């Protein structure tokens, strides 16, 4: 129904990406899964980090969980 790829270190849990079966798009499975992961992180005294999104609809969805926008620096290096 839904899956999430997360990584963690000693301080934080990072949500890198997730997905769901489109047949169950309105089931709430993704929302439930993220809620569970966030609650588990908080219970273990870890920060939870959505790692942001440049897509407005996804960023708005994350804000529904209480996410706050935080500017980050992105460094790119061209190989050519």
Image: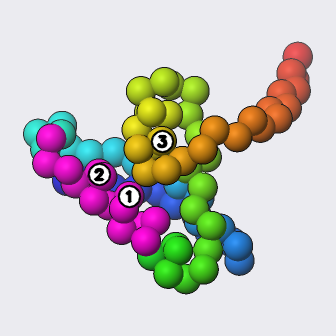
Whole-angstrom CA distance, mark 3 to mark 1, is 12 Å
Residues 71 and 18: in front is: 71
- Place of residue 47 in the rendered image (x, y in percent of width and height, measured from the top left): 62, 67
Q: Is residue 30 left or right of residue 37?
A: left
N-term mark: 3 or 1: 1
Q: Are marks 2 and 3 in contact (CB under 8 Å)?
A: no
Judge depth for marks 3 and 1 and give the one in front.
Answer: 3
Residue drawn at (22%, 54%) of the image: 29
Q: What segment carries the magenta color?
A: 26-39
N-term mark: 2 or 3: 2
Q: How is the image coloured?
A: rainbow
Outermost residue to the top: 80
* 34 relative to 12, above or below: above
Q: Which residue, given by chain and number where applicable, does mark 2 sit on?
A: 30
Residue drawn at (14%, 48%) of the image: 27
Q: Residues within 10 Å of mark 1 (few under 14, many from 20)?
A: some
Q: Are marks 1 and 2 in contact (CB under 8 Å)?
A: yes
Q: Is residue 30 visible?
A: yes
Q: Are marks 3 and 1 in contact (CB under 8 Å)?
A: no
- Place of residue 42 in the rendered image (x, y in percent of width and height, measured from the top left): 52, 74
Main secondary structure of the magenta stretch? helix
Q: Which mark is residue 63?
A: 3
- Place of residue 68 in the rendered image (x, y in percent of width and height, measured from the top left): 60, 44
Residue 49's image quarter?
A: bottom right
Residue 33's image quarter?
A: bottom left
Q: Which residue, given by chain and number where applicable, does mark 1 sit on?
A: 34
């Amino acid at each position: 129904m839904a899956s999430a790829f997360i990584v963690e270190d000693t301080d934080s849990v990072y949500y890198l990406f997730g997905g769901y079966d489109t047949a169950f798009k309105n089931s709430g499975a993704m929302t439930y899964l993220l809620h569970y992961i966030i609650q588990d992180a908080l219970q273990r005294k870890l920060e939870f980090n959505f790692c942001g999104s440049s897509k407005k609809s996804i960023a708005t969805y994350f804000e529904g969980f209480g996410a706050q926008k935080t500017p980050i620096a992105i460094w790119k290096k061209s190989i050519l």
